[in-house]
Image (cartoon, helix red, strand yellow):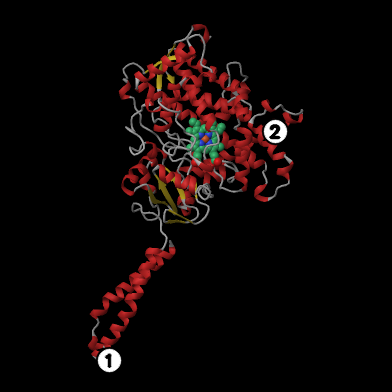
Amino acid sequence: MTRATDQSGTMDYLTSTLTSIPSLDYSAANGLTEQTMKFYVLLTTMILVPLVLLMKLQQSRLPKLPPGPPGWPILGHLPMLGNMPHQVMMELSHKYGEIYSLKLGSRPCVVVSTPKMARVFLETHDKNWASRSTDLMHSYYLSYDHKGIGFSPYGPNWRQLRKIVNEEIFTEKRMEASTEIRKQELHHMIRSITHHVQQGKLVTFKMEGMAFTANMMARLVLNRRFTAGINSTAEEVDKAKHFAYLVRELFELEGMLVIADYVPWLRFLDIGGAEKRMKALFPLFHEFLNQIIAEHEVKRQKGPIAEEDEDMVDVLLNAMNRKENQDKVGDEYLDMDNVKAAIMDLFVGGVDTPNVLIEWTMAELIRNPPLLRKLKEELDSVVGKDRFVEETDIPKLKYLRAVVGEAFRLHPAAPLLAPHASLKDSEVEGYHFPAGTILYINTYAISRSPESWERPLEFDPERFMSGPDVDVSGRDFRILPFGSGRRRCPAINMGVLLSRFVIASMVHAFDWSLPEGQIPEELDMTEVSGLTVPLAKALELQAKPRLAPYLYI
Ligand code: HEM
């Protein structure tokens, strides 16, 4: 970058020198004859013209970033992105193509908007682009200075954690062992909705979904519930409230745009107050995690824990205490900060994303009554009306899988994934990218592209009814709700299963409708962007139990 600018500066100077030569006043020149002057001008021209041409040629050969829109001084394209960066980036791709550059403050970025280009970055050049920015404020304060999974740069520490997560946490065996937890939490959700119905209240779908995913994740990760129950003591209620506060604050801060991340010299202003809040949150979270670890240590000292009873904290502590880890040094070694940062990441990763997807799916079904009817019919014919849905029903529910697949396509919860960053200087598709370039894979633009999908803006599960199930695992680059390559979500199976299970259970257990006076076609589908992209206006619905009454007691 700097080299290119320096050289074009020199060239501008040379070009202006050349063009100014004919206007020299020969007669005023130190007693030289006109003939001698002409000779010198000719000589200079003969030397300079080839030199300039050579430099121009050299410059055209210099590697460069892809083209992009003009930006602002200092802030670059930050002011352009507004509240909905994925939408603005999609618009820009219509003008600047499938790969273009942006500059966010001082950070170079590349935006990719087609399946072909996504494959180039996430498959062909995946290793170099599987890193994360190493100096973001939230990763410093809220991820123990990049020691977790989601925000850590590519390197030995991240690889170690990712291996544990892939091979010891999100395994088939553990998924099976946690079936009962998911079932219990789902029944809690049904009871909570029934309670609202009995009180004549509307159901805020997002709140119910959030309580479900947060309780389930809290049990899987920490072996405790997120919300207090009817029989909880005052101390348990206080603890649950404190936990809920920590998590809400964590989500909000991780979703905030921190200007100082892009224009570091503005850090002293702390625009928006993010740093102050992060500084305040960290010690509270640290203390909370210390308590969790202490509780686990006490339990572990009592004797070995059966594999099926281990939660994710146990798995991480086992890995940390293993001799092979203790023998490692430097970046290879996993310590307690890694364990705590990983706990936070697993919790953040698992609570919000499924919930966002579930709310979008429900909104699409409410907006399209014939689709909702068709799903109910399928559920009634497979499950009947005398019991709730079980996870084992899902393989028999083809239309359900198509509905959820279509929601993954049209409403990716993290439309720009978690931004990747390049490890070192690299060349891709003839362009040059310096180390640390941020990569935005715009999955939103990809899955709304008419080149990949017929009627792309229409919610139409039928497109997945013939042929095999929609593949969201990262192999089909036309639909990437979980990303692809080394950095893809490690919990794809769990995310897909949860989304299907909750949607099936909700549609089967209740008749849903909009509050009096609202009509389906006018449902507000506006998005809001943060850590994820949910509906801007939370979906509020009326519910009516539709199965055998004894099930709801
Ligand atoms: C519908 C559900 C889910 C969706 C749509 C989703 C989506 C994603 C996406 C888009 C990424 C970023 C991929 C990238 O950077 O290329 C990601 C990463 C991650 N997800 Fe998920 N996710 C879901 C469920 C879960 C669950 C249930 C957990 C944990 C229990 C989880 C844990 C993580 C973690 C730890 C990462 C970071 C991976 C890394 O950076 O190496 N996710 N997820």
Residue at 37% across, 39% down: 445
SS at badge 2: helix
- Ligand 1 within 8 Å of the CB at mark 1: no
Going by the image, does 348 lie left or right of 517? right
Q: Is residue 27 above or below residue 545?
A: below
Asked if residue 249 shows in the view, the reply is no
Asked if disc 2 and disc 1 are in contact, CB closer than 8 Å, the reply is no
Q: Position of residue 310 (x, y in %)?
A: 67, 28
Left or right: where 492 falls relative to 96: right
Please state, as top left, top right, bottom left or bottom right, where the N terminus lies in the image.
bottom left
Q: Nearer the viewer, residue 78 or 461?
A: 461
409 versus 144 height, above or below: above
Three-letter amino acid code at the position of disc 1: Leu
Secondary structure type for disc 1: loop
Q: Return the x and y of residue 162 as percentages of the image width and height.
A: 60, 40
- Horizontal and vertical percent position of residue 185: 56, 20
Q: Is residue 48 left or right of residue 120?
A: left
**Residue 294, label in figure:** 2
Of the residues shown, which amino acid type is indicated by label 2? Ala
Q: Is residue 450 visible?
A: yes
- Residue 203 position, x and y percent, is 44, 19
The residue where tag 1 is placed is 32
Which of pointers 2 and 1 lies earlier in the amino acid sequence? 1
Q: Residues within 10 Å of mark 1 (few under 14, many from 20)?
A: few
In the picture, residue 9 is in which quadrant? bottom left
Structural distance between the alpha carbons of marks 2 and 1 = 93 Å
Q: Ligand 1 near label 2 (Cβ, under 8 Å)?
A: no
Residue toward you, 124 or 549: 124
290 to the left or right of 212:
right
Q: Residue at x 62, y 41 (%)?
A: 161
